Image (cartoon, rainbow, N blue to C red):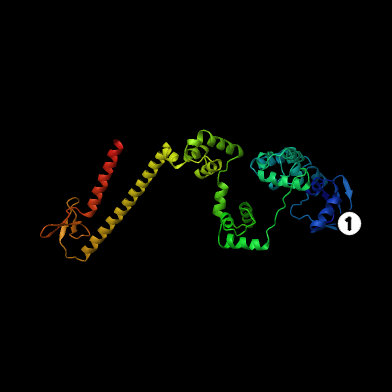
């Protein structure tokens, strides 16, 4: 597209991106990035400037220039100040949780958006400010540990990384700096074989001694960076609840005081953690319960009763499934014999009145040894009815025990 002359709006995103307000400078800036169009001359609002033929990136992504066909139209275009609609759009995107670098306002560059974010006191960068750096130096020099350092809007990992950089720069006095040992190609090959191909976890790799000079945390972090971890295990670890510094101190104080004689299950339920975490803290503090102390607790007996009830319920469900399957098998066998016109005596069940074949498959048989002979007798109740009567008898007995 060739343009010979025209009126260019001075406060376009192209000109505001340079901050100088000079059209020639802005044109030269875009000329170096993405030359696409050619302009022979133009006139800016309040400026009359002739420009030599040069390539100007009007169609470059992220750079737009507002063009007006006349000075009258240029006067009615949006001014340099932010309008009410632009401010409303910016606030709505901030309230919706849009990342600062993803905010889009029509006819506004990232420099203009960043200026307005700074005016609204919205942090658009995670860089360390001088005040945060001074606060960290003041906390580290007295000898505070990493868990005791507190910087607003900074995680423990960010504080640790910044502390390391300050040590390397010599801002923290004469403190020893441990240099990081980079992974060699042989170590990376071993890690790829065991973590990716074999499917071991970081704890398994560390326990096997494959990388003797690496700690468990180093192996775990390296596997995470290389994407060797199990996605299910990684997601479960991300969703796990981790105690804060204050919560961990309260748990330790509780275990050393009144929680010393409580069961791990009760403590885990009280602090909303797992029993494994509770037992781990107990072992570290040396307040683990002995076998006799654990059995003497009332919660142990309640847990034993719950386990017995769950086992009883599981067995009842298992036997119910077995009876249903057995009944279905007997009925199918009886129908198959009837279709074949099987020659066998018929025996009517005394309970259900159904005419079954007099076979051991349908009726239980008892043998009694007498002095001169063996007496064989067949039950008058089929096996299906016996199962039902036995189930009803058990149900009645359990109900009587519950009432008693």
Residue 56 makes an appearance in the image: no
In percent of width and height, residue 65 lies at 78, 50
Q: Position of residue 30 (x, y in %)?
A: 81, 54
Q: In the rendered view, would you say 70 is above or below 205?
A: above
180, 106: nearer the viewer = 180
Relative to 354, say whether 291 is above or below.
Answer: above
Q: Residue at x 72, y 47 (%)?
A: 164
Q: Position of residue 272 (x, y in %)?
A: 52, 39
Towards the viewer: 295 or 340: 295
> Left or right: where does residue 390 sit relative to residue 217?
left
Which of the image's four quarters has the N terminus? bottom right
Numbered disc 1: secondary structure: loop
131 with respect to 203 (left or right): right
- Give above or below for 253 relative to 175: above
Q: Residue at x 66, y 39 (%)?
A: 148
Find residue 216 and report its horizontal and vertical position in percent: 61, 53
> Residue at horizontal 68%, vertical 61%?
184
In-image side of 50 versus 102 (left or right)? right
Residue 181 lies in quadrant: bottom right
Q: Residue lying furthest top in this view?
A: 258
Q: Nearer the viewer, residue 63 or 185?
A: 185
Locate the C terminus by quadrant.
top left
Q: How many marks?
A: 1
At 50% from the left edge and 43% from the top edge, which residue is drawn? 275
**Residue annotated with mark 1:** 52
The correct choice, above or below, for 201 with respect to 404 in the image is below
Crowdedness of circle 1 by 10 Å Cα count: few (<14), some, many (20+)? few
Q: Residue furthest left?
A: 372
Q: Is residue 135 visible?
A: yes
**In front of the other: 48 or 363:** 363
């Amino acid at each position: 597209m060739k343009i010979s002359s025209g009126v260019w709006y001075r406060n376009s995103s192209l000109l505001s991106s340079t901050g100088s307000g000079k059209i020639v400078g802005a044109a030269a800036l875009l000329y170096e990035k993405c030359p696409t169009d050619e302009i022979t001359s133009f006139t800016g609002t309040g400026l009359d400037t002739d420009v030599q033929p040069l390539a100007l990136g009007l169609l470059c992504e992220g750079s737009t220039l507002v063009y007006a066909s006349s000075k009258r139209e240029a006067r009615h275009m949006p001014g340099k100040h932010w309008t009410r609609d632009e401010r409303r759009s910016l606030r709505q995107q901030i309230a919706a949780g849009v990342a600062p670098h993803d905010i889009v306002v029509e006819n506004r560059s990232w420099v203009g958006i960043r200026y307005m974010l700074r005016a609204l006191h919205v942090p658009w960068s995670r860089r360390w400010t001088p005040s945060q750096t001074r606060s960290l130096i003041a906390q580290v020099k007295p000898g505070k540990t990493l868990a005791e350092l507190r910087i607003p809007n900074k995680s423990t990992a960010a504080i640790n990384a910044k502390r390391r950089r300050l040590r390397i720069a010599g801002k923290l006095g004469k403190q020893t700096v441990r240099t990081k040992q980079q992974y060699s190609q042989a170590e990376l090959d071993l890690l790829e074989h065991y973590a990716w191909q074999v499917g071991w976890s970081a704890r398994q790799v560390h326990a096997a001694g494959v990388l003797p000079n690496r700690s468990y945390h180093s192996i775990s972090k390296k596997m995470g960076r290389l994407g060797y971890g199990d996605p299910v295990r990684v997601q479960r670890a991300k969703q796990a609840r981790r105690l804060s510094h204050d919560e961990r101190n309260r748990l330790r104080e509780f275990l050393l005081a009144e929680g010393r004689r409580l069961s791990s299950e009760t403590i885990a339920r009280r602090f909303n953690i797992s029993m494994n975490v509770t037992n781990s803290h107990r072992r570290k503090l040396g307040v683990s319960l002995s076998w006799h102390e654990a059995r003497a607790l009332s919660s142990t007996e309640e847990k034993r009763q719950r386990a017995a009830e769950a086992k009883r319920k599981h067995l009842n469900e298992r036997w119910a499934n077995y009876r249903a399957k057995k009944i279905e098998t007997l009925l199918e066998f009886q129908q198959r014999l009837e279709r074949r016109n099987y020659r066998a005596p018929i025996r009517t069940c005394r309970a259900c009145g159904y005419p079954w074949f007099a076979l051991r498959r349908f009726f239980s048989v008892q043998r009694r040894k007498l002095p001169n002979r063996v007496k064989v007798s067949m039950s008058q109740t089929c096996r299906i009815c016996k199962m039902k009567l036995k189930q009803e008898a058990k149900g009645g007995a359990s109900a009587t025990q519950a009432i008693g």
